[in-house]
Amino acid sequence: MSRGRGGVRGLVNRLRGRDIELKTPGELEAMRAAGALVARTLVAVVELAKPGVTTAELDALAEQTIRDGGAVPSFLGYHGFPGSICASVNEQIVHGIPSASAVLADGDLISVDCGAVLEGWHGDAAVTIPIGAVSEADLKLSAACEAALHAGIAAVRPGGRLTDISHAVQEACEEAGRRDGVPYGIVAEYGGHGIGTSMHMDPFLPNHGEPGQGPRLRAGMALAVEPMLTGGDPETLELADGWTVVTADGSRAVHWEHSVAITEDGPRILTLPVS
């Protein structure tokens, strides 16, 4: 689940450094267990997501998978959010509320954001899923966002600065836009965040900016890296439900995310499936 610039600071059990939680290797292993469950949940959701399926059905599957894994959905009840996943379809960017009336159709794009807390540690990840026969433009948009995610992850290294990640995401988005001939919109109001004993923790991680700014990255930190791209103007609107964020111009939007630990050996993705 993305964090807005004015988002709520996570309740932190143990703060070190610049109010950024540092984890021991054992604690990162605990986070990896939570992240692996999130990954398994997303694999199940991707398999179910087909034309005719409702986003409420995806939500029910996600909740059951998380609970069967001995965990609790991070999102359910979070500041009143009513779902275990965020299910954002087409022009919805983030925080879409699952609904029995939201029936997936051929050609849709759905971004599914999922979080789980296992033994006190959070995992958070998101994927964008093409439903049926999706346009080439939408597939390129999603691929551009996923590539930006991995560019950002590559910058999650000890000794760097927070906005090194932001700049890597921005550069990858702009490069994809030049290649595809589309000026993809980078959503600025929402971004990544620290993660650990709470889902949303300091620091806020923008998806664009100059490098070399912000806190220095240290081994033991964990960040949710989550670019969001639009196929048009990046301006956003929040719907009357108080959650769902959409593109102002109605263009398609995509969202990809991983929880990533900073180690002495570089980035470690915590939300990959167990091979």
Image (spheres, grey):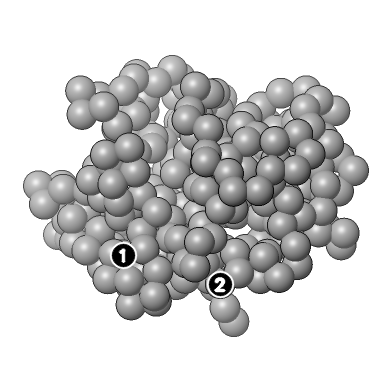
Disc 1, disc 2: CB below 8 Å? no
Crowding around mark 2 (Cα neighbors within 10 Å: few <14, some 14 to 19, many 20+) is many
Looking at the image, residue 168 lies above or below residue 124: above
Name the residue that disc number 1 marks: 62
Percent position of residue 131, x then y: 30, 56
Q: Name the element at disc 1.
A: helix
Percent position of residue 190, x then y: 50, 29
Instruction: Report the amino acid beneath label 2.
Output: Ala
Percent position of residue 94, x then y: 38, 37
Q: In the displayed structure, does residue 263 sit left or right of residue 166?
A: right
Q: Which of the 4 quarters of the picture holds residue 43?
A: bottom left
Looking at the image, residue 161 lies above or below residue 51: above
Q: Which mark is residue 178?
A: none
Q: In what quadrant of the picture does the C terminus appear?
A: bottom right
Q: In the displayed structure, does residue 52 sit left or right of residue 12?
A: left
Residue at 40% from the left image edge and 69% from the top image edge = 71
Give the mark nearest the N terminus, 1 or 2: 2
Q: In the displayed structure, does residue 65 sit left or right of residue 203?
A: left
Q: Name the element at disc 2.
A: helix
Name the residue that disc number 2 marks: 33
Q: Label 1 to label 2, Cα distance in Å?
A: 16 Å
Specify the farthest residue to the bottom: 275
Instruction: Report the amino acid beneath label 1.
Output: Ala
